[in-house]
Amino acid sequence: MDIFEFAVQKEKFSEDFYRDLAGRTRNKGLRTIFDMLAGEEAHHRQVIERIKAKIPARLSETDVLSNAVDVFKRMKEGIDKFAFAATDLEAYKKAQDIEQQSRDFYLQKADEVEDNCQKGVFTKLADEEKKHFLLLENIIEFVSRPQQWLENAEFFHLDEY
């Protein structure tokens, strides 16, 4: 299997995983974030498919982190009581592991390919996966202690990436 086909499969798996998480969560804000992440993974897959087909493709930076901050702000305004199962937390940690593996894969492939366009896309994909990893880190922290996390203004550091 070539690197592009493998990458397409990785992105499809991630997209499906996030859609499953969105379908399982009872929290509307987290559902929105997981839907956003699924959409991002679908976009990544489309870019990789274009590159594989030798169609010029560019991956532009996304605003997933700033959009997530907006969702968290809305969640803070309407916070009542959050209930999460231990299995939810395990699934979010698994998603974070998937993002780290994807980032590592894209960084490795960026070093291996000769074509500058492909190298640039793989590097940007790695950057996007890092953003997803950081977002999941915040979700894990939020699920672990929602009231304290939402009261702490430091979570807005997502804007910096």
Image (cartoon, rainbow, N blue to C red):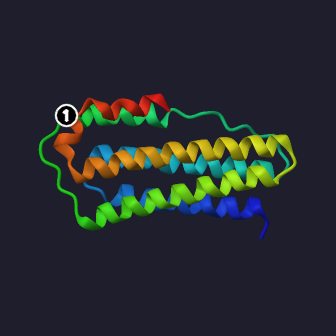
* Residue named by callout 1: 151
Where residue 70 appears, x then y in whole percent?
A: 35, 30
**What residue appears at the point 71 percent right and 55 percent down from the top-left corner?**
108
**What residue appears at the point 39 percent right and 49 percent down from the top-left corner?**
137
For this orientation, the residue located farthest to the bottom is 1
Pick the residue in front: 93 or 58. Answer: 93
Left or right of 123 in this view: 41? left
**What residue appears at the point 81 percent right and 40 percent down from the top-left corner?**
117
Q: Which quarter of the rendered picture does the N terminus lie within?
A: bottom right
Left or right of 63 in this view: 3? right
Pick the residue in front: 18 or 144. Answer: 144
**What residue appears at the point 75 percent right and 59 percent down from the top-left corner?**
4
Left or right of 55 in this view: 34? left
Q: Amino acid at mark 1?
A: Glu
Where residue 86 appears, x then y in whole percent?
A: 25, 66
Where residue 73 appears, x then y in whole percent?
A: 28, 31
The answer to whether any part of residue 27 appears in the image is: no
Q: Residues within 10 Å of mark 1 (few under 14, many from 20)?
A: few
- Above or below residue 79? Residue 31 is below
- Above or below residue 7? Residue 141 is above
Element at label 1? helix
The answer to whether any part of residue 150 appears in the image is: yes
Where residue 133 appears, x then y in whole percent?
A: 47, 49
Residue 5 found in image quarter = bottom right
Left or right of 95 in this view: 101? right
Residue 69 found in image quarter = top left
